[in-house]
Image (spheres, rainbow, N blue to C red):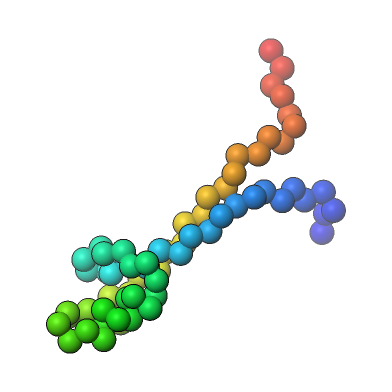
Amino acid sequence: MSDNLVKIPAEAKEIIKHKRSGKIYATKADFDEDVADPNTDTTQEDFIQDLEIKVTIVSMGAATKK
């Protein structure tokens, strides 16, 4: 393994969604509450979890010569 690895700052965001309706929940607990609510038809099979990764732009120190 190389000692010259560059660490790039990144931010991960978890996105909890309802498969059929596309509704986005703030937390998995909010989704679970919707499943437990007898007034909705939401089931555990409607659960979708995505991960959004944002990478900070980092200069690698190289410049293009003209």
Residue 11 lies in quadrant: bottom right
Quick one: quadrant of the C terminus?
Answer: top right
Q: How many marks?
A: 0
Q: Is residue 65 left or right of residue 50?
A: right
Residue 27's spot in the image, x, y percent?
A: 39, 71
Q: Nearer the viewer, residue 13 or 3?
A: 13
Q: Horizontal placement of 40 versus 5: left or right?
A: left
In the rendered image, is residue 43 in sight?
no
Q: Quadrant of the N terminus?
A: bottom right
Q: On screen, 49 above or below 54?
A: below
Where's residue 5, x and y in %? 77, 51
Determine which quarter of the picture holds residue 62: top right
Q: Residue at x 40, y 63 (%)?
A: 15
The image shows residue 65 at horizontal and vertical percentages of 71, 17
Above or below for 48 versus 53: below
Instruction: Give the residue at x 59% y 44%.
Output: 56
Q: Residue furthest left?
A: 39
Q: Which residue is located at x 34 percent, y 75 percent?
A: 30
Say if residue 12 shows up in the picture. yes
Q: Residue furthest top?
A: 66
Q: Residue furthest right?
A: 3
Q: Is residue 17 left or right of residue 39?
A: right
Vertical placement of 35 versus 12: above or below?
below
Q: Identify which residue is drawn at 21% across, 66% down.
A: 21
